[in-house]
Amino acid sequence: MNAADAITRRAGAEPIAAAIVLGTGLGPLADAVAEAVAIPYADLPGFPHAGVSGHAGRLVIGHLGGRRVAVLQGRVHTYETGDPRAMKPVIDTLKALGVPRLLLTNAAGSLRPDMPPGSLMVIEDHIALFGPNPLIGLAGDDRFVPMNGAYDAGLRQAIASGAAEAGIPLFEGVYAWVTGPSFETPAEIRALRTLGADAVGMSTVPEVILARHAGLRAAALSMITNLAAGLAPEAPSHAETKAVAHAGAAAMAAVIRGCLTSLADA
Ligand code: HPA
Protein backbone atom coordinates (compact mmCIF):
# COMPACT_ATOMS: atom_id res chain seq x y z
CA MET A 1 0.00 0.00 0.00
CA ASN A 2 1.37 3.45 -0.84
CA ALA A 3 1.36 6.38 1.60
CA ALA A 4 -1.64 8.12 0.01
CA ASP A 5 -3.76 4.96 0.35
CA ALA A 6 -2.58 4.47 3.93
CA ILE A 7 -3.61 8.04 4.78
CA THR A 8 -7.02 7.70 3.13
CA ARG A 9 -7.63 4.42 4.94
CA ARG A 10 -6.77 5.90 8.37
CA ALA A 11 -8.17 9.42 8.00
CA GLY A 12 -10.85 9.18 5.31
CA ALA A 13 -11.04 10.50 1.76
CA GLU A 14 -12.59 13.93 2.39
CA PRO A 15 -10.63 16.55 0.38
CA ILE A 16 -7.74 18.29 2.13
CA ALA A 17 -7.58 22.04 1.48
CA ALA A 18 -3.97 22.58 2.52
CA ALA A 19 -0.92 20.83 3.88
CA ILE A 20 1.15 22.63 6.47
CA VAL A 21 4.78 21.79 7.21
CA LEU A 22 5.83 22.72 10.73
CA GLY A 23 9.33 24.07 11.26
CA THR A 24 11.73 23.72 14.17
CA GLY A 25 10.05 24.38 17.50
CA LEU A 26 6.65 24.94 15.85
CA GLY A 27 5.38 21.40 16.51
CA PRO A 28 2.81 22.54 19.14
CA LEU A 29 0.82 24.09 16.30
CA ALA A 30 -0.44 20.58 15.55
CA ASP A 31 -2.25 20.69 18.92
CA ALA A 32 -4.58 23.33 17.45
CA VAL A 33 -5.93 20.81 14.93
CA ALA A 34 -9.44 19.59 15.83
CA GLU A 35 -10.75 16.03 15.32
CA ALA A 36 -7.15 15.03 14.70
CA VAL A 37 -5.99 11.71 13.31
CA ALA A 38 -2.23 11.36 13.87
CA ILE A 39 -0.19 8.97 11.74
CA PRO A 40 3.54 8.41 12.49
CA TYR A 41 5.75 8.87 9.42
CA ALA A 42 7.05 5.37 10.18
CA ASP A 43 3.63 4.01 9.13
CA LEU A 44 3.76 5.80 5.77
CA PRO A 45 5.81 4.08 3.04
CA GLY A 46 8.51 6.37 1.64
CA PHE A 47 8.09 9.02 4.31
CA PRO A 48 11.41 10.14 5.80
CA HIS A 49 12.58 9.74 9.36
CA ALA A 50 12.52 13.21 10.90
CA GLY A 51 15.57 13.08 13.11
CA VAL A 52 16.24 16.63 14.33
CA SER A 53 15.38 17.57 17.89
CA GLY A 54 12.35 19.87 17.73
CA HIS A 55 10.59 17.68 15.13
CA ALA A 56 8.15 14.85 15.93
CA GLY A 57 7.79 12.96 12.63
CA ARG A 58 4.05 12.49 12.26
CA LEU A 59 1.22 13.57 10.04
CA VAL A 60 -1.84 15.08 11.71
CA ILE A 61 -5.05 15.29 9.70
CA GLY A 62 -8.00 17.28 11.00
CA HIS A 63 -9.63 20.67 10.97
CA LEU A 64 -8.10 24.13 11.43
CA GLY A 65 -9.66 27.47 10.54
CA GLY A 66 -12.70 25.70 9.10
CA ARG A 67 -10.66 23.69 6.57
CA ARG A 68 -9.53 20.11 6.45
CA VAL A 69 -5.74 20.16 6.71
CA ALA A 70 -2.79 17.81 6.76
CA VAL A 71 -0.15 19.00 9.21
CA LEU A 72 3.32 17.59 8.67
CA GLN A 73 4.90 17.67 12.08
CA GLY A 74 8.49 17.18 11.13
CA ARG A 75 10.52 17.65 7.97
CA VAL A 76 13.84 16.44 6.75
CA HIS A 77 16.51 19.04 6.08
CA THR A 78 19.21 18.78 3.46
CA TYR A 79 21.81 18.87 6.24
CA GLU A 80 20.54 15.58 7.68
CA THR A 81 21.11 13.39 4.64
CA GLY A 82 22.83 15.61 2.08
CA ASP A 83 19.80 14.97 -0.13
CA PRO A 84 17.73 18.07 -0.95
CA ARG A 85 15.07 15.72 -2.40
CA ALA A 86 14.35 13.97 0.92
CA MET A 87 10.86 15.49 1.14
CA LYS A 88 9.85 14.44 -2.40
CA PRO A 89 7.88 11.34 -1.28
CA VAL A 90 5.88 13.58 1.07
CA ILE A 91 5.09 16.13 -1.63
CA ASP A 92 4.26 13.42 -4.16
CA THR A 93 1.86 11.93 -1.60
CA LEU A 94 0.15 15.31 -1.14
CA LYS A 95 -0.21 15.55 -4.91
CA ALA A 96 -1.65 12.03 -5.06
CA LEU A 97 -4.17 13.02 -2.38
CA GLY A 98 -5.17 16.06 -4.48
CA VAL A 99 -3.96 18.60 -1.90
CA PRO A 100 -3.77 21.89 -3.82
CA ARG A 101 -1.67 24.02 -1.46
CA LEU A 102 1.43 23.69 0.67
CA LEU A 103 2.06 26.14 3.47
CA LEU A 104 5.55 25.85 4.92
CA THR A 105 6.75 27.25 8.21
CA ASN A 106 10.27 27.61 9.45
CA ALA A 107 12.56 29.20 11.97
CA ALA A 108 14.90 31.77 10.45
CA GLY A 109 17.56 34.29 11.36
CA SER A 110 16.93 37.98 10.61
CA LEU A 111 19.26 40.09 8.52
CA ARG A 112 17.34 43.21 9.44
CA PRO A 113 17.80 44.87 12.83
CA ASP A 114 14.24 46.24 12.49
CA MET A 115 12.88 42.64 12.28
CA PRO A 116 13.73 41.29 15.74
CA PRO A 117 13.36 37.77 17.20
CA GLY A 118 9.69 36.90 17.62
CA SER A 119 8.70 38.56 14.32
CA LEU A 120 6.76 36.71 11.63
CA MET A 121 7.85 37.12 8.01
CA VAL A 122 5.94 35.90 4.98
CA ILE A 123 8.39 34.88 2.27
CA GLU A 124 7.93 36.82 -0.95
CA ASP A 125 10.85 35.23 -2.79
CA HIS A 126 14.03 33.28 -2.10
CA ILE A 127 17.73 33.10 -2.93
CA ALA A 128 19.05 29.54 -3.23
CA LEU A 129 22.23 29.97 -5.22
CA PHE A 130 24.53 28.17 -2.80
CA GLY A 131 22.85 24.82 -2.22
CA PRO A 132 22.05 21.81 -4.41
CA ASN A 133 18.80 21.98 -6.35
CA PRO A 134 16.37 19.18 -5.38
CA LEU A 135 15.51 18.52 -9.04
CA ILE A 136 19.08 17.66 -10.08
CA GLY A 137 19.04 14.20 -11.62
CA LEU A 138 15.34 14.11 -12.45
CA ALA A 139 14.46 13.43 -16.06
CA GLY A 140 12.06 15.28 -18.34
CA ASP A 141 11.58 18.83 -19.47
CA ASP A 142 9.30 19.56 -16.54
CA ARG A 143 12.40 19.72 -14.32
CA PHE A 144 12.98 23.21 -15.77
CA VAL A 145 10.47 24.71 -13.39
CA PRO A 146 9.95 28.48 -13.59
CA MET A 147 10.30 30.02 -10.15
CA ASN A 148 8.65 33.37 -10.90
CA GLY A 149 5.79 33.74 -8.47
CA ALA A 150 6.81 30.55 -6.63
CA TYR A 151 5.30 32.02 -3.46
CA ASP A 152 1.63 32.15 -4.42
CA ALA A 153 0.15 35.66 -4.36
CA GLY A 154 -3.31 34.48 -3.25
CA LEU A 155 -1.90 32.44 -0.37
CA ARG A 156 0.33 35.32 0.72
CA GLN A 157 -2.74 37.56 0.69
CA ALA A 158 -4.59 35.04 2.85
CA ILE A 159 -1.64 34.97 5.28
CA ALA A 160 -1.68 38.78 5.43
CA SER A 161 -5.43 38.71 6.17
CA GLY A 162 -4.88 36.11 8.89
CA ALA A 163 -2.19 38.25 10.52
CA ALA A 164 -4.29 41.42 10.29
CA GLU A 165 -7.32 39.70 11.88
CA ALA A 166 -5.16 38.35 14.70
CA GLY A 167 -3.54 41.79 15.19
CA ILE A 168 -0.10 40.32 14.60
CA PRO A 169 2.43 42.44 12.67
CA LEU A 170 3.70 40.69 9.56
CA PHE A 171 6.94 41.37 7.74
CA GLU A 172 7.47 40.39 4.13
CA GLY A 173 10.87 39.53 2.72
CA VAL A 174 13.37 37.46 0.82
CA TYR A 175 14.60 34.21 2.41
CA ALA A 176 18.13 33.05 1.67
CA TRP A 177 18.52 29.28 1.83
CA VAL A 178 21.72 27.79 3.17
CA THR A 179 22.27 24.08 3.74
CA GLY A 180 23.70 24.38 7.26
CA PRO A 181 24.08 22.73 9.64
CA SER A 182 26.77 25.17 10.71
CA PHE A 183 25.43 28.69 11.08
CA GLU A 184 26.70 31.43 8.81
CA THR A 185 29.76 33.56 9.39
CA PRO A 186 29.23 37.30 9.90
CA ALA A 187 30.88 37.84 6.49
CA GLU A 188 28.39 35.45 4.85
CA ILE A 189 25.52 37.34 6.48
CA ARG A 190 26.88 40.66 5.16
CA ALA A 191 27.15 39.05 1.70
CA LEU A 192 23.57 37.71 1.85
CA ARG A 193 22.33 41.13 2.95
CA THR A 194 24.09 42.71 -0.04
CA LEU A 195 22.40 40.14 -2.28
CA GLY A 196 18.99 41.28 -1.04
CA ALA A 197 18.09 38.73 1.64
CA ASP A 198 16.00 39.68 4.67
CA ALA A 199 16.18 36.32 6.47
CA VAL A 200 18.28 33.17 6.36
CA GLY A 201 17.43 29.56 7.06
CA MET A 202 18.17 25.90 6.35
CA SER A 203 14.79 24.61 5.12
CA THR A 204 11.69 25.35 3.03
CA VAL A 205 13.32 26.12 -0.32
CA PRO A 206 13.79 22.48 -1.41
CA GLU A 207 10.12 21.82 -0.59
CA VAL A 208 8.96 24.91 -2.47
CA ILE A 209 10.90 23.82 -5.55
CA LEU A 210 9.52 20.26 -5.25
CA ALA A 211 6.00 21.63 -4.74
CA ARG A 212 6.24 23.82 -7.84
CA HIS A 213 7.55 20.82 -9.78
CA ALA A 214 4.52 18.83 -8.57
CA GLY A 215 2.13 21.68 -9.45
CA LEU A 216 1.16 22.59 -5.88
CA ARG A 217 0.70 26.21 -4.89
CA ALA A 218 3.18 27.13 -2.17
CA ALA A 219 3.66 29.80 0.49
CA ALA A 220 5.93 30.08 3.50
CA LEU A 221 5.98 31.84 6.82
CA SER A 222 9.15 32.36 8.86
CA MET A 223 9.35 32.71 12.61
CA ILE A 224 12.34 34.94 13.24
CA THR A 225 14.21 33.33 16.12
CA ASN A 226 17.41 35.39 16.20
CA LEU A 227 19.41 38.16 14.63
CA ALA A 228 21.78 36.50 12.16
CA ALA A 229 25.50 36.10 12.85
CA GLY A 230 27.29 39.38 13.42
CA LEU A 231 24.08 41.38 13.98
CA ALA A 232 23.87 40.50 17.68
CA PRO A 233 26.59 40.27 20.32
CA GLU A 234 25.97 36.55 20.89
CA ALA A 235 26.28 33.79 18.26
CA PRO A 236 23.12 31.97 17.05
CA SER A 237 22.35 28.55 18.52
CA HIS A 238 19.92 25.70 17.89
CA ALA A 239 18.74 25.93 21.52
CA GLU A 240 17.74 29.56 20.98
CA THR A 241 16.07 28.70 17.66
CA LYS A 242 13.92 26.05 19.33
CA ALA A 243 13.06 28.17 22.38
CA VAL A 244 12.06 31.32 20.47
CA ALA A 245 10.11 29.35 17.85
CA HIS A 246 8.29 27.47 20.61
CA ALA A 247 7.38 30.77 22.29
CA GLY A 248 6.05 32.12 18.99
CA ALA A 249 4.11 29.02 17.98
CA ALA A 250 0.80 30.42 19.26
CA ALA A 251 1.13 33.56 17.12
CA MET A 252 2.07 31.42 14.13
CA ALA A 253 -0.98 29.21 14.77
CA ALA A 254 -3.29 32.24 14.94
CA VAL A 255 -2.00 33.55 11.60
CA ILE A 256 -2.32 30.15 9.94
CA ARG A 257 -5.82 29.63 11.28
CA GLY A 258 -6.87 33.05 9.94
CA CYS A 259 -5.15 32.34 6.64
CA LEU A 260 -7.09 29.10 6.20
CA THR A 261 -10.37 30.83 7.08
CA SER A 262 -9.80 33.54 4.51
CA LEU A 263 -8.89 31.25 1.61
CA ALA A 264 -11.08 32.17 -1.32
CA ASP A 265 -12.14 28.56 -1.96
CA ALA A 266 -11.92 25.25 -0.11
N1 HPA B 1 20.78 30.94 10.25
C1 HPA B 1 20.32 29.86 9.57
N2 HPA B 1 19.24 29.19 9.92
C2 HPA B 1 18.56 29.61 10.99
C3 HPA B 1 18.96 30.73 11.73
C4 HPA B 1 20.13 31.43 11.34
O1 HPA B 1 20.55 32.43 11.95
N3 HPA B 1 18.06 30.89 12.74
C5 HPA B 1 17.14 29.90 12.59
N4 HPA B 1 17.43 29.13 11.53
Image (spheres, helix red, strand yellow):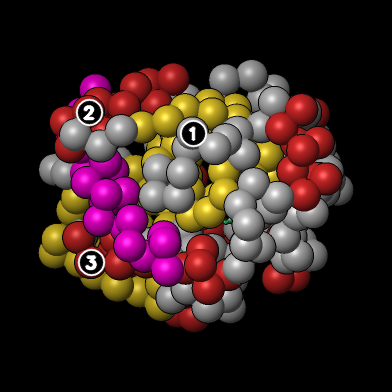
Seen in the picture, residue 134 relative to 239 is either above or below; the reply is above
**Which numbered disc, 1 or 2, marks the residue that appears first in the sequence?**
1
The residue wearing badge 3 is 31
With respect to residue 105, does 115 lie above or below?
above
Q: Amino acid at mark 3?
A: Asp
Measuring 58% from the left and 78% from the top, which residue is drawn there? 51
- Is ligand 1 within 8 Å of the beta carbon of the residue shown at mark 1? no
172 part of magenta stretch = no
Ligand 1's quadrant: bottom right
Mark 1 vs mark 3: in front: 1
Nearest the viewer among 175 and 113 is 113
How far apart in space, not on screen, are marks 2 and 3 (Cα)?
23 Å
Instruction: Give residue 137's position: percent from left, percent from top.
Output: 86, 48
Q: Give the residue drawn at x 28%, y 43%.
A: 256
Looking at the rendered structure, the kind of residue marked 2 is: Ala
The residue identified by callout 2 is: 164
Of the image marks 2 and 3, the number of the one nearer the N terminus: 3
**Which residue is at the front of the view, 60 or 165?**
165
Query: Residue at horizontal 77%, vertical 38%?
Result: 190
x then y, percent, for residue 207? 60, 47
| Residue identified by numbered label 1 | 114
Q: Quadrant of the C terminus?
A: top left
Q: Tell me: residue 243, above or below residue 134.
A: below
CB atoms at circles 1 and 2 under 8 Å apart?
A: no
Residue extending farthest to the front is 233
Residue 184 visible within the image:
yes
Mark 1 and 3 residues: CB-CB less than 8 Å, in contact? no
